[in-house]
């Protein structure tokens, strides 16, 4: 067990390192850099910018250093000072923006995941046990329906409906008075009031998918001989379904926990823009457009690291719940 | 021990599967009696309905299968009370009192019949607690004792082991321990040795015989292995396409089989010192389940088929008090003396 833990941790560390290298390289791939953007802007406004000034800016920012030197400096600052660099566009410390936005994304992802599980797993379970019943067909239909609707469209519809019937659009995660206030019970309560809309909108398409997955997983298990053994014991149907096939069918979901985060973050970007949510998606998008490289790299690195950590944790959880993984090595 | 008391009486049992392609008559009029303390072997080729029939005895036929008619009369000990299992709600509390307690079952696949998620002990204790309401501690003691009895080494340690860490033979022993945990009056064994290697097969069969002597339960043993039949059976029922075609004590079946199908089955067993070419398999294949032949279902493969076999469904003929056969050759022999002369086919 300890050996397993150690090996997995080593893999995780290595993965994070590779990701940091890749994410730093990727954001430098587009032609030009922040200085060329800046020069373009200045030229559009005032006219002349001397090539010397441009060259000097590049030197200050270190854009002309070789890739590895830039990477090394960046990494050194993260590891020794916890600094991710500076946002050229927002004129702020990148780390501030990350700590402000990332927890929101994380919380929203977590809540959406919970919503998805709470809704999808029981429906999938029911669908499998009552295969080809009317309820099963209805669930399948709603599932495909939910999958087919783009969630930004759903967000727009919700905005329209709430504005039309409640007189106020459900935008953002906080009311105006709490938006920039410090955390308090009032703010938390206010968050609870707002969060369900994006939670449902972001979750709805994964809900549909998960219903299908759960149904398929469980159907696979329902005809396994151990279910028949349990039935031949005289266990009641509900009890045996929960103890045996459901337990087996749930295992795969534990391992999906880890990589739910990135898919939700990429899924929420457009929804967050529509609903004006203070999450990572929109700001990462803006940073990429503006070649605001330290913000972009910082977000990508942190998201990836969280994903790796999440996968690591879900692997441990899986080993914990499934004796086959725990004991066979 | 054996008091010749009838324990289970099956009358004209029909289990049909209602699929999109049509109705499969997996069990189509089975009659059987099982005496307490005795062993009945149910024999037949794959797909003849043996497994479905014995699942019906526990009310655990899977959808789209359903018991459509017939009676499964169960006479648990003493007082002459009779229960019709076929008439019970398969999910009801009544039948669940019988399953695992009065009638228990072991299955063909020891590798997958136990859940890998729980320890062997957990799965056996569950059965005991469910039916006896004993505390977990008492049930655990009993489980260790049972595991010891079925020949599992170091039972106090293996009780906490997961099934996938045991060999196939050990798992089947654990299944047997589970089946015996509530002293059943009847044990159904659905090809319990098919998935095991030959040495282990012999051990498991010996174990079942020993335990039967000790517990005095009736055993319904389903197999297609006639060697196993010779070793175990008191009585034999031969099934073909959902019907019992011959039923007799084991000696009669081996020495004086009457039904052409039984005769062919016996001829198809390879014997030691026999030359290879002499192996005599039954001609043809089990017919498509959706298109059963008219008349006697065996007639297309029967070496003694007559013209009349094509349209007339044979009924049961009692040759002597213990020997029943379902074949037109023996039906009302005084009625059609001439026509019934065997006409060879091919």
Image: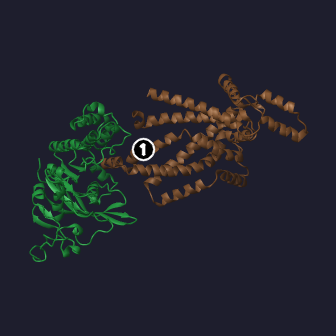
Picture residue at 52% right of the left edge, 59% below the top:
A138
Q: Check the image and name the residue furthest to the top.
A: A80
Tell me the green chain: B
> Is residue A89 among the parts visible in the rendering?
no
* Residue B20 image position (x, y, % from top left): 40, 65
Q: Is residue B218 above or below residue A295?
A: below
Picture residue at 56% right of the left edge, 29% below the top:
A13
Task: Bin the neighbour count of mark 1 within 10 Å (Cα to Cα): few under 14, some 14-19, many 20 and up.
Answer: many
Colour option used: by chain
> Is residue A324 among the parts visible in the rendering?
yes
Nearest the viewer among B344 and A267 is B344
Q: Quadrant of the N terminus of chain A?
A: top left
Q: Quadrant of the C terminus of chain A?
A: top left
Tell me the brown chain: A
Q: Check the image and name the residue furthest to the right.
A: A47
Q: Is residue A189 left or right of residue A329?
A: right
On the image, numbered disc 1 is attached to which residue?
A: A248
């Amino acid at each position: 067990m300890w050996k397993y833990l150690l090996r997995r941790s080593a893999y995780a560390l290595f993965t994070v390192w590779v990701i940091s290298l890749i994410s730093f390289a990727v954001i430098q791939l587009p032609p030009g850099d922040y200085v060329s953007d800046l020069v373009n802007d200045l030229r559009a406004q005032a006219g002349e910018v001397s090539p010397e000034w441009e060259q000097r800016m590049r030197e200050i920012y270190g854009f002309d250093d070789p890739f590895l030197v830039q990477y090394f400096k960046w990494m050194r600052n993260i590891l020794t000072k916890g600094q991710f660099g500076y946002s050229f566009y927002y004129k702020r410390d990148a780390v501030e923006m990350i700590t402000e936005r990332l927890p929101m994304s994380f919380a929203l992802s977590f809540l959406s995941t919970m919503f998805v599980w709470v809704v999808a797993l029981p429906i999938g379970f029911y669908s499998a046990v009552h295969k080809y019943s009317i309820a099963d067909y209805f669930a399948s239909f709603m599932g495909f329906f939910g999958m087919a609707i783009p969630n930004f469209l759903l967000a727009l519809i919700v905005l329209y409906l709430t504005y039309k019937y409640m007189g106020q659009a459900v935008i953002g995660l906080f009311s105006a008075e709490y938006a920039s206030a410090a955390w308090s019970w009032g703010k938390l309560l206010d968050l609870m009031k707002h969060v369900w809309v994006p939670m449902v909108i972001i979750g709805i398409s994964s809900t549909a998918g998960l219903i299908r997955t759960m149904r398929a997983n469980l159907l696979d298990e329902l005809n396994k001989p151990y279910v028949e053994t349990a039935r031949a014991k005289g266990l009641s149907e509900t009890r045996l379904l929960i103890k045996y096939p459901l337990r087996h069918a749930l295992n795969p979901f534990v391992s999906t926990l880890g990589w739910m985060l990135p898919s939700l973050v990429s899924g929420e970007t457009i929804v967050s823009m529509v609903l004006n949510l203070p999450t990572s998606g929109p700001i990462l998008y803006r940073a990429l457009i503006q070649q605001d490289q330290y913000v972009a790299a910082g977000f990508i690195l942190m998201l990836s690291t969280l994903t790796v950590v999440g996968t690591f944790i879900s692997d441990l959880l899986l080993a914990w719940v499934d004796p086959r993984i725990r004991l066979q090595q | 021990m054996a008091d010749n008391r009838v324990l289970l009486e099956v009358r004209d049992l029909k289990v049909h599967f209602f699929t999109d392609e049509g109705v499969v008559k997996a069990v189509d009029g089975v009659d059987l009696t099982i005496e307490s303390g005795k062993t009945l072997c149910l024999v037949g080729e794959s797909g003849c309905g043996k497994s479905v029939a014995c699942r019906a005895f526990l009310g655990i036929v899977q959808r789209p299968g359903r018991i459509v008619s017939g009676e499964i009369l169960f006479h648990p000990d003493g007082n002459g009370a009779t229960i019709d299992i076929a008439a019970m709600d398969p999910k009801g509390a009544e039948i669940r009192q019988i399953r695992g307690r009065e009638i228990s079952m072991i299955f063909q696949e020891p590798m997958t019949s136990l859940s890998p998620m729980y320890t062997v002990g957990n799965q056996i204790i569950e059965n005991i607690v469910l039916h006896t309401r004993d505390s977990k501690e008492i049930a655990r003691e009993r489980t260790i004792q049972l595991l010891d009895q079925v020949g599992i080494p170091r039972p106090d340690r293996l009780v906490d082991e997961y099934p996938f860490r045991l060999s196939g033979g050990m798992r089947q022993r654990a299944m047997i321990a589970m089946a015996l945990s509530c002293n059943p009056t009847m044990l159904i064994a659905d090809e319990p040795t098919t998935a095991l290697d030959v040495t282990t097969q012999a051990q498991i069969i010996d174990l079942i015989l020993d335990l039967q002597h000790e517990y005095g339960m009736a055993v319904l043993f389903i197999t297609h292995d006639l060697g196993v039949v010779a070793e175990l059976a008191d009585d034999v029922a031969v099934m073909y396409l959902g019907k019992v075609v011959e039923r007799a004590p084991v000696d009669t079946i081996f020495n004086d089989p009457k039904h052409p199908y039984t005769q062919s089955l016996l001829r198809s067993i390879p014997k030691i010192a026999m030359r290879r070419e002499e192996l005599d398999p039954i001609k043809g294949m089990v017919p498509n389940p959706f298109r059963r032949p008219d008349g006697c279902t065996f007639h297309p493969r029967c070496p003694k088929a007559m013209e009349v076999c094509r349209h007339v469904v044979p009924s049961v003929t009692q040759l002597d008090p213990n020997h029943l056969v379902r074949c037109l050759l023996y039906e009302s022999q005084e009625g059609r003396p001439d026509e019934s002369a065997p006409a060879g086919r091919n």
